Image (cartoon, rainbow, N blue to C red):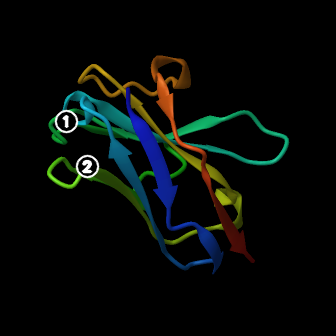
C-alpha cells in the first residue's frame, strides 16, 4: 500500500512559479513510477507529467513542456513538480499518483494510488 500527500499549492499571479511536493509512504515507493495530473472545474482529469522508477525518464503534456519539471528523491520518498511561467489555464486541482511498476505512463487509469489533491490558482 502507498499513501500520497500533496502540498505546495496556492494562489499565484500569471508568470509566477509554484513548487508542488508529494510525500509518499509505504513499502513500495522506491519501486513506483509517479505522475502528476490535474483537473480544472468542469473538465476531465488530465495528465501533466510522469517520472520513472529511476528518475531517468520523464514525460510531459505538451501544454506544460518547457515550463514544468518533475523530479524525485527516492531517499526522501518525495516527488516534486516545479511550475514556472504559470498561466491562468494552469488553474486546477493537482493530484499526485503512483503505480507499482517502473514505467511512467500518461494514462490516469494506469495509476493505482492517488493523493487528495492540492489547489493551484493562477490569476491574470
Q: Residue at x 81, y 47 (%)?
A: 41
- Asked if residue 60 shows in the view, the reply is no
Please say if the residues under marks 2 and 1 sit with CB atoms less than 8 Å apart.
Answer: yes
Mark 1, other Cα within 10 Å: few <14 / some 14–19 / many ≥20: some
Q: State the image quarter where residue 104 is shown.
A: top left
The picture places residue 70, in percent across and down from the top left corner, at: 34, 52
Nearest to N terminus: mark 2 or mark 1: 1
Q: What residue did someone put label 1 on?
A: 30
Q: Which part of the image, by quadrant, shows the C terminus?
A: bottom right
- Asked if residue 75 shows in the view, the reply is yes
Indicate whether 73 appears above or below 48.
below
In the shown orientation, is residue 112 left or right of residue 30? right
Q: In this orientation, which residue lies closer to the viewer: 54 or 16?
A: 54
Q: In this orientation, which residue lies closer to the viewer: 21 or 40?
A: 21
At mark 1, the secondary structure is helix
Indicate whether 58 appears above or below 18.
above
Q: Residue at x 57, y 78 (%)?
A: 15
Q: Residue at x 18, y 47 (%)?
A: 74
Q: Residue at x 51, y 72 (%)?
A: 85
Q: State the image quarter where residue 45 is shown.
A: top right
Gap in angstroms between the C-alphas marked 2 and 1: 7 Å
Q: Which mark is residue 53?
A: none
At mark 2, the secondary structure is loop
The picture places residue 123, in percent across and down from the top left corner, at: 73, 76
Q: State the image quarter where residue 108 is shown.
A: top right
Q: In this orientation, which residue lies closer to the viewer: 100 or 56?
A: 100
Q: Which mark is residue 77?
A: 2
Q: Which part of the image, by quadrant, shows the N terminus?
A: top left
Q: In this orientation, which residue lies closer to the viewer: 102 or 6?
A: 6
Amino acid at each position: 500500500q502507498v499513501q500520497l500527500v500533496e502540498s505546495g499549492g496556492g494562489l499565484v499571479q500569471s508568470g509566477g512559479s509554484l513548487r508542488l511536493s508529494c510525500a509518499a509512504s509505504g513499502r513500495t515507493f522506491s519501486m513506483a513510477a509517479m505522475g502528476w495530473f490535474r483537473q480544472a472545474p468542469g473538465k476531465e482529469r488530465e495528465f501533466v507529467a510522469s517520472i520513472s522508477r529511476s528518475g531517468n525518464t520523464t514525460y510531459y503534456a505538451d501544454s506544460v513542456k518547457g515550463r514544468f519539471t518533475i523530479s524525485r528523491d527516492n531517499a526522501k520518498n518525495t516527488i516534486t513538480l516545479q511550475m514556472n511561467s504559470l498561466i491562468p489555464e494552469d488553474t486546477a486541482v493537482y493530484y499526485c499518483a503512483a503505480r507499482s511498476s517502473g514505467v511512467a505512463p500518461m494514462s490516469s487509469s494506469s495509476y493505482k494510488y492517488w493523493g487528495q489533491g492540492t489547489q493551484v490558482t493562477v490569476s491574470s
